[in-house]
Image: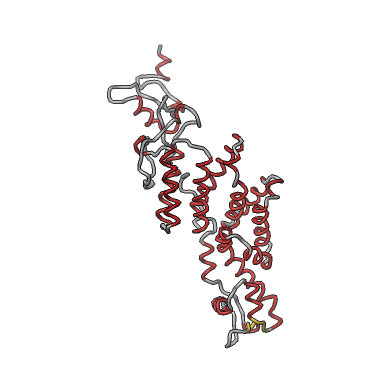
Amino acid sequence: HVSGMSSRGRGGRRGRGGRRWRSRNRHSSSKDKTWRRGATSRPSHGETRVDSKGRVAGEAGSASSQFVGTMQELEKSYFRLTRKPKPSEVRPLAVLQKTFELLRRKRAEGAGYEYLSDQYKSLRQDLMIQDIKSPFTVLVYETFARIAIEITDLSEFNQCQARLKELYAEGRDRREPEMVKNYHEFLSYRLLYLLVTSRSMEMMEFLRSLAPKDRKDKQVRFAMDVMIAVTQGHYHAFNRLYNGATPLVGSVLKIILPRVRYRTLAKGIKAFRPMRTTKIEMWMRILNFPKQDECAAYLAECGVSLSKDHKEVLLNQTKNVKRPKELAQANKHNGGGVVHGLF
């Protein structure tokens, strides 16, 4: 039949998307064909397919995602998967739990962040490859997310909180309280992250998505108060929140402080200029400096004129306020936290 040749022809039948698949020959196995097809193919029963980002395809609980590792080593460096993983390269759950306890001990003993970041990323990768979604998985992601916040590594934190969002939804669907017990804590971190990275549109969308019970949570309420203080320029309210923050939240607010400080100084110099001179103690309170010499050094760097004894600010001799070095460091986080993978 001539018309049939146009759709099938000698090159073999056409597959999905109009692509032509050649018939199997002695040099091409069905497994090879699966990997050539890439993301549009479906792995056969018992196979695990890894995409370009190293993630294992297949729905949770399906036969294609049933993958159990056999590796027994506790420590393993992270590497991006570009092929189907072997069971001997992946640690099973029991080993991963031991790895987690090992990493907690090493952190307590002072292990470096570079080592911890590599090991935790490898741990998270093994959890995802085996499609393990449990309270332990949540604990792993939450633990390293807190470490990343403390170090102010926004990129790593963003990777963790993106995955935690999915895990919390899974926990609510399963009605597992252990998976969602820290939900509000990380909801507050998410809001502070959006504030630090100056993502105004996402921040507004995030606020609209908050349920009334979420807004009443103490930690979420605190993050919202910080957001209001920063966006509306209430330096006094921000200083109060900054001084009363937990150490972990304080690590995030340290990134925001230089911006608030500079804006407050620029506005304050204009507002108080008619006074001609002011005491430096006033600026210590306004700019949230605990020591006079630190405040004086900051003002001098910003081009503010001071008396010889550094006890008075000479507003009438100050023309323009310069941007300090600490502001340039803080601005590196603007638009930061880009995801470089999902582990």
* Quarter occupied by residue 162: top right
In the displayed structure, would residue 312 be above or below residue 224? below
Residue 242 percent across, percent down from the top left: 62, 64
Residue 41 percent across, percent down from the top left: 43, 29
Q: Nearer the viewer, residue 215 or 341?
A: 215
Tally of numbered tags = 0
Residue in view at x 58 percent, y 76 percent: 291
Name the image colouring.
secondary structure
Left or right for 23, reference 142: left
Q: Residue furthest left?
A: 26
* Quarter occupied by residue 261: bottom right
Q: Residue furthest top?
A: 1
Residue 334 percent across, percent down from the top left: 54, 58
* Quarter occupied by residue 26: top left
Left or right for 166, reference 26: right
Q: Nearer the viewer, residue 15 or 192?
A: 192
Residue in view at x 64 percent, y 53 percent: 219
Q: Quadrant of the N terminus?
A: top left
Residue in view at x 67 percent, y 74 percent: 268
Residue 232 percent across, percent down from the top left: 69, 62
